[in-house]
Image (tube, coloured by chain):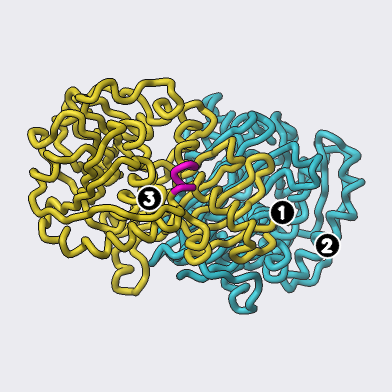
Chain colours: A yellow, B cyan
Amino acid sequence: MAKIRILNKKDIKKVINLKDIIDATEKAYVQKATGDAEVWPMVFHEFDPGHADLDIKSGNLNQAGIYGLKVVSFFDSNENKNLPVLTGTSMIFDIKTGQPKAVLNAGPITDYRTGAAGAIGAKYLARENSENLLMAGCGALAPYLIAATLLTMPKIEKITLVNPKNPDHAEERLETIRERVNELLYESGVAAFFDMKAESDTEKAVAEADVILTATPSYEPMIKKEWVKPGTHFSCVGSDMSGKQEIDENIMAGALVFGDDLQQCKNVGECEKAFKAGILTELRAEIGDVISGKIAGRLSDEDITVFDSTGIALQDLVSAACILTEAEKLGLGTTADL
Amino acid sequence: MAKIRILNKKDIKKVINLKDIIDATEKAYVQKATGDAEVWPMVFHEFDPGHADLDIKSGNLNQAGIYGLKVVSFFDSNENKNLPVLTGTSMIFDIKTGQPKAVLNAGPITDYRTGAAGAIGAKYLARENSENLLMAGCGALAPYLIAATLLTMPKIEKITLVNPKNPDHAEERLETIRERVNELLYESGVAAFFDMKAESDTEKAVAEADVILTATPSYEPMIKKEWVKPGTHFSCVGSDMSGKQEIDENIMAGALVFGDDLQQCKNVGECEKAFKAGILTELRAEIGDVISGKIAGRLSDEDITVFDSTGIALQDLVSAACILTEAEKLGLGTTADL
């Protein structure tokens, strides 16, 4: 009889930190690029298109010794029921025996692993001496992306927050995001001293930025090509469904464009429109090939670089494995014979 | 925070019984036929072909108010590790909110739902006055198929057990199977009086049978067409992978052939070879259409009928839902906040 561990949000919050999730995610990207980790076909089902659907993402990570899956459902009617609109649940299995090991609430993990992804894009593709960070989007993901990028890009000195669709919103959200960034850095054992301001003029903020992180649910470009200075890096995490787009597809022309999964970027990512318009024919590589050193990232300080992070099951699984290891050490969660 | 219930083998054995699983499975078949339940695409991954693989089967059952999935892994090296070679785990979610409800050990459910499937095939396709039941295959599934068919076919008077590949094996297994059939009938509240014998001559046993259940891992036909008398019904549950076959494909010529899933029967079921050889071009219908009365089953006492049960996720999910309802009433299992 297998013993499984059930980890809820509270358990996970006791052990999760961005530093560990960044390290784990880098390893997952490299394993994907080398074939040591695989993403399995996604199951997608719509109960009520636009209102209720779900997907099952799964895969294996040989070095972490696991395979597993994450079920994410979206029910917009949950808003009226005091229930989360998005519900994520992960299951982890032992890759040597197939025995179930754990069930985890995937909610908190999703925020951390998405922040880690954007920051890894910046670490391997942005100019090393980047100082000005621009966060486009002021939602729940913003603090995770900012804090993770402060961890991977230690020379960042200035952080600007914009909400291109609703310019005043950045100022309203500034304090909440600042506080959460502080907490996230503290969790990772890093003292937080940073300069962060809200800006209502997106064009001005883009023109000054070295690194731009985008995390919005946008379906049309918010950042125009003519605003962008040479040498800028973009990490775009908002596009995870066909039709979504955050930055002008013409930015991709002449840029060095990387992704987390070659096929998924074409189908649902920030690059979808550029591919359909013939602006892009291929990504340069998956980010794992850059991390491993197989493919060069940025070639000069003048290059515009883009990391299209569509989100892959391996990020969730490697993060879950990392959390499970810590939770086992501390005896957290509920255990049950299965 | 969702509260989930973890049900292990012991918990499940306290509430499961064939009668309930037969009733639930009939409903699932009908819902599939009417579009009220859906089977989602299967994920299949091989770690080491022939030695280690897994599949994820999933779907929704609107009337039961759930969706869910079952992960089944096969690791033949587990035999040396005192672990099960097959490991099954199911997860059930609320179809109105996407909240996780339960995690179940799927092992015992698989035996019951497979027995129920074969018995439902007999109930709707065999001659109502069938008296002679033949069980071909003496493995773990045999008692479940026999007991379930005794429940659905109350006029059965004689049961014969054969192992076509290893004729003496039937006699060796007779007592163990008889005992388990008794237990299964007792669980369903039925007193057991039945005549059961082992037979080493498969041809002779087939010639006498009214209903033939097959549950073997065979890759070549064990039962020849010329042995089969008019009016015989077959429920074949052994073929669940491409290449498997239990009965002569020529039996399908002129027979009335039904299945649990039209496409799956073509790809991996008992009918695969008959389709490939051009003996069959279409199944008459899915069994759900027969249960609901939309399509006639047997047309005369002379027809040979076949039910090709390949196994579908809905059987597992409806059974899990049925068990969960009983377990909740009794407060069984471990509950945890997720």
Which residue matches tag 2? Answer: B194
Instruction: Pick whichever, A29 or A177, lies toward us.
Output: A177
| Magenta part, dominant SS | helix
Which chain's residue wears label 3? A
Q: In this view, does B78 lie to the left or right of B178?
A: left
Q: Which quarter of the image is occupied by the C terminus of chain A?
A: bottom right
Which residue matches tag 1? Answer: B145
Q: Can residue A276 be seen in this view?
A: no
Instruction: Pick whichever, B315 or A115, lies toward us.
Output: A115
Q: Is mark 3 on a helix, strand or loop?
A: strand
CB contact under 8 Å: marks 2 and 3: no
Q: Can residue A188 be seen in this view?
A: yes
Q: Residues within 10 Å of mark 2 (few under 14, many from 20)?
A: some
Instruction: Pick whichever, A270 or B112, lies toward us.
Output: A270
Where B95 falls versus B203 (above or below)? below
Numbered label tally: 3
Image position, residue B67 (x, y; %): 46, 59
Q: Which residues are drawn in magenta?
A: A19-24
